[in-house]
Image: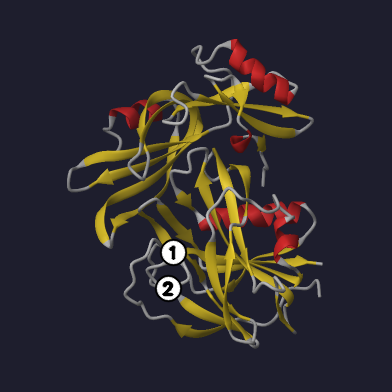
Amino acid sequence: MSSRPLLVLALIAVAAALPLASRGATTSNLTLLGVAEDSFYNYDFASKAVSSSNVDWPVCLVFYGNADVNKVKNIYWGITILANPMYAYLNDGQGFVWDEDRGTKGVVWSSYLNSYVYLHMRVYAPNPPDYLYNAYYGKYVVATAHYDQFPLESWSGYTEYAEKDLAAIASGKGYAVYRDLYYFYNYEPYRVEGNHIWLNNGYATYVYVP
Amino acid sequence: MALSDPLVGSILAGSNWTLVEMGAWVESGRLVGAALLIRLERPVWASGDFRDLGGRSYRAKLWVGSLHVLVDLSARRVVAVSPGMARPPADPPETAVDEAVRAVAAQRLGARPVLAGLFYTDEYPAGLAFFTATVGGRERIIAVDVARRVAVDKYSGEVLKP
């Protein structure tokens, strides 16, 4: 199962924008993705409301094989308490549930920005059991990623750079990494919305966790 | 417009630089202006009053490796300059902190640290100093509360290099 996952994701539905007072950011690409009997949205949310005006960051990483949320966080900095919780809406074949996560977070040197930044990844799966499962991906989790400005956290963003850094860290620790493997329909050109800096190529990276 | 801003201009005068990204700056669905990410070829020591993307102002002295700049196209002026703190190439060209503050970081790091930056915020009006050192191939950053001369764990730790 250490080979790259073969099953291509299916786009199930495009979410309608619902009127909602939210603290999230806005995208025009919110979409439900399907893998076998499972499905999940291609963004996480700022609260437990599915809305294109309530998103936080694009889903850009899948850890598969024999993954679970804590095992994946322990590849990086473990569990963090120094972050706000965000939310994912997922279906492991038995109905949709919300998962909440603060993520894993630490300081890295970003060669893209020539600066120190926080690298922050939130990892999602129904809890319990803290992983999704299907015959193609095994036990897997999905993740969003971004930089936070260091040290004041005055902005957040650059999903694409964060995804690349997280992939490089995993690769450096011996994990099999498949960069930009499948299109997740969440391309975001560079733009600033509040303190949210969007940048994502729309392709997700896969990391095999034995 | 961005380059004519005195703070941006003075920082960019210190190094070659690249405009890495440029795009729209929107608020509540309305186009307000332009956002720029500028990456400096080598760090520049800068001191000034900065204004971040959320509108908060603070004073800082730091080695700058990149700049985020917001330009309000209606007002035709720069409204935010947010510096990225770079890995310090050397001690800064001014005495930004006294040696007692550096000694706090040195004790934690087990090596002579170099100052990367000093931020003056509401929580740290006398300054929060950031020092770095690489020991045994591992880079660490230590934050020191200048007023209390103690390390601040929340901002300290190993720096991963992806």
In the rendered structure, find residue A29 and report the number of the disc placed on it: 2
Find the distance from the CA under tag 1 to the CA under tag 2. 8 Å
Task: Say which of A27 and A22 sits in front.
Answer: A22
- Using the image, name the chain to which the residue with label 1 belongs: A
Is B94 left, or right, of A25 in this rendering?
Answer: right
Q: Secondary structure at mark 2?
A: loop
Q: Are marks 1 and 2 on the same chain?
A: yes
- The type of residue carrying mark 1 is Glu
Task: Say which of A207 and B1 sits in front.
Answer: A207
Q: Can residue B30 be spotted in the picture?
A: yes
Residue indicated by mark 1: A188
| Image quarter of residue B48 | top left
Above or below for A199 versus A30:
above
* Residue A112: percent from left, percent from top: 54, 46
Residue at 74 percent across and 55 percent down: it is A74
Q: Upstream in the sequence, badge 1 or badge 2?
A: 2
Display coloring: secondary structure
* Residue B84: percent from left, percent from top: 48, 37
Q: Secondary structure at mark 1?
A: strand
Is A55 left, or right, of A91 in this rendering?
Answer: left
* Residue B138: percent from left, percent from top: 74, 34
Answer yes or no: do the residues labelled 1 and 2 have beta carbons within 8 Å?
yes
In the rendered structure, find residue A131 and report the number of the disc placed on it: none
Residue at 61 percent across and 23 percent down: it is B150
Residue at 41 percent across and 23 percent down: it is B47
- The type of residue carrying mark 2 is Asn
Above or below for A120 versus B52:
below
* Residue A4: percent from left, percent from top: 73, 73
